[in-house]
Amino acid sequence: MPKVSQEYLNARRRGIVEAARAVFAERGFAATPMTAIVSASGLSTGTFYRYFPSKAALVAEIVSGRDGTEGGTFPADEAPGDLLRRLISYVTPPGASADHARLVVQIWAEASTSGELAAVAVSRHTSLRDHLAHLYARERQGGTGGEEPAAADRTRAEAALAALIGYATLTAVDAPTDFTALGLEIVAAFS
């Protein structure tokens, strides 16, 4: 059996993620069984599950890069306002499709009843909150990033992320909102 390149495996993995995004956008996260995603991917069940053994693993890959990280890590020189603007851009049309906002809201809702998915969502959220708290500590202390966040930094980060989750929810349901003004207000309040 010929050995396949890492590039080929990565391309196949990206294809699965794109198929999942499309099916989730069409059917909703909770209403989409893994069999529908397997079918949309065009792969056999066995091959599919080698890449993603569960819906939670697939979700972790889908949100990668939209969880505040770039290439798997947080940018070192980013200011809190830069991070908040970037997170807002992921869910604000026309720069982004409302599909991602819908998926974010559905993931949080489904996580309330799925321990496996809750573990993924909470892990990503905690990582982002801690990073944002470090950015606040660095800015507050005028340092270069080694400062330990205070409880107030973590609370401020949690409040900012809660506002962003609410923003994503309004986007997901296409609420009659001036998203540009709301996004600017969130950034101003939490930068």
Image: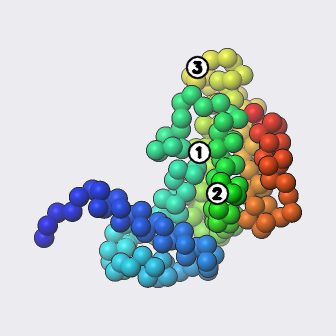
Query: How far from the left and from the top, in percent, is residue 119?
Result: 56, 58
Q: Amino acid at mark 3?
A: Thr
Q: Is residue 69 left or right of residue 97?
A: left
Q: Going by the picture, which residue comes out furthest to the top?
A: 142
Q: Please name the residue shown 38% across and 64% down the image.
A: 13
Image quadrant holding the N terminus, namely: bottom left
Query: How far from the left and from the top, in percent, is residue 17?
Result: 47, 66
Residue at mark 3 to residue at mark 2: CA–CA distance: 32 Å
Q: Is residue 47 left or right of residue 91?
A: left
**CB under 8 Å between callouts 2 and 1?**
no
Count of numbered circles in the view: 3
Q: Please name the residue shown 32% across and 77% down the image.
A: 46
- Front in this rendered view, residue 44 or 53: 44
- Front in this rendered view, residue 178 or 170: 178
**Residue that numbered label 1 is attached to:** 68
- Front in this rendered view, residue 126 or 26: 26
**SS at circle 3:** loop
Q: Which callout, 3 or 2, points at the residue further toward the start of the chain? A: 2
**SS at circle 1:** loop
Q: Pointer 1: residues within 10 angstroms few (<14), some, or many (20+)?
A: many
Residue at mark 2 to residue at mark 1: CA–CA distance: 15 Å
**Residue that numbered label 2 is attached to:** 96
Q: Amino acid at mark 1?
A: Gly
Image quadrant holding the C terminus, namely: top right
**Residue that numbered label 3 is attached to:** 144
Q: Please name the residue shown 29% across and 56% down the image.
A: 7
Q: Which callout, 2 or 1, points at the residue further toward the start of the chain? A: 1
Q: Amino acid at mark 2?
A: Ala
